[in-house]
Amino acid sequence: MSTESASKPARAAGASKKRGKAKYIVLLGLVVAVVIAQQTGLLGFGLAHLRAATFPKDESLLEYVHGSVPGVVIVDPHQLDLNALGAEGGSVRQHIERTRDDIKKATGIDLGFDVDKLVLSPSIVVARGRFDEQKLAARLAEHSYVQAEYKGVKYLLRAGEDAIAVRDGSILLYGTEPELRASIDAEEAETSLASRDEVTSRLAHIGWDRPLLGVALLAESKPSLRAILTGSTGPRAVTVGVSTKGGLSTTAAIDAASADAAEELRKLLEEKRANVDALKSLAGPEPGAALAEIAKRATLTVDQGAGRLTVQVDVRPEELERLAKAGQAAVGSLGEMYKNVRLLQLLAPGP
């Protein structure tokens, strides 16, 4: 047997060992990458982003909102396209970035990275995401927040002001102490907003696949016979969904007592949007003109069977910027407009 023939099996064995070693190195690299992604939150963020794109519906967050609230606004950062809110450096984008920075400085929570979905209601703020309870407690201790507990749920309290709780590292609750406790009670007793079909069905009608979704209940969900027969009552509920693909695209579903009432409302809105002078008088010359252009493009349709008026409005990024600047000039700054929102009072105190 020649030397060359004998060396072939040896070379093949060596190559096989190298390939096996390479596989182990790749596998180890993947494990390390997953661990790093888990520790930094990238894994959770990636999974949440995928879930937002494929399964955006998340009614379980409503279980932390008491059933008596008149409505909620739901924000999904994963579906938000900032380009639709104007150019980078514009008024709207600057305000969003400033708010995000202020909240991160105060709490360590990044609204664009750590929060997957946010529910705002008059009584409680609920967020789903990735939250470190110990780090939050350490940061808020500097703001005189102390540990408290209710029915086994620990939370941070600033006496006489507000409270914040992290549950299982994935749910954050914020409100006054009575409101936070009411949220805990509602979840336990199953008397939350999630149990109200008039809320969940309206949200489903508009669709959860939007970065901004809200519903407001204005009257009893079921009208009286008199209200149905006369058709003279106002809206009973308003549900709004906003998409940010190519600009702001807003769908508003207004539920009336009857088809006749919905048709009367449509006629009234048609008259209002045709009155450009009234819009200018209400909002000012420049924003009024922008509003008139937006209103002109809007579509209004009535679903006779449901007694529902649907309004579709599209706002271009440049129009939004014009309206934002006009509003900023009128009130001093967009930040001032949000000072009364309790979440920002805690996390982003005014300049």
Image: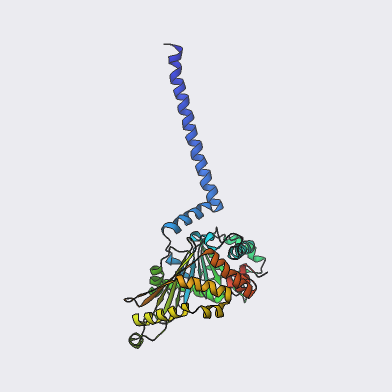
Can you give x and y, in whole percent of width and height, for residue 121 in the image? Answer: 51, 73
Can you give x and y, in whole percent of width and height, for residue 257 in the image? Answer: 37, 82
- Residue 155 appears in the picture as rendered: no
Q: Is residue 93 left or right of residue 257?
A: right
Query: Which of these two is toward me, 155 or 103?
Result: 103
Query: Which corner quadrant holds the N terminus?
Result: top left
Quarter of the rendering containing residue 305: bottom left
Quarter of the rendering containing residue 67: bottom left
Question: What residue is drawn where x is 41% and y is 57%?
Answer: 54
**Relative to 4, is 343 above or below?**
below
Question: What residue is drawn where x is 35% and y is 78%?
Answer: 307
Query: Which corner quadrant holds the C terminus?
Result: bottom right
**Relative to 218, is 18 above or below?**
above
Can you give x and y, in whole percent of width and height, for residue 30 in the image? Answer: 50, 42
Q: Is residue 338 left or right of residue 235?
A: right
Quarter of the rendering containing residue 197: bottom left
**Relative to 185, is 35 above or below?**
above
**Relative to 126, is 231 above or below?**
below
- Residue 223 appears in the picture as rendered: yes
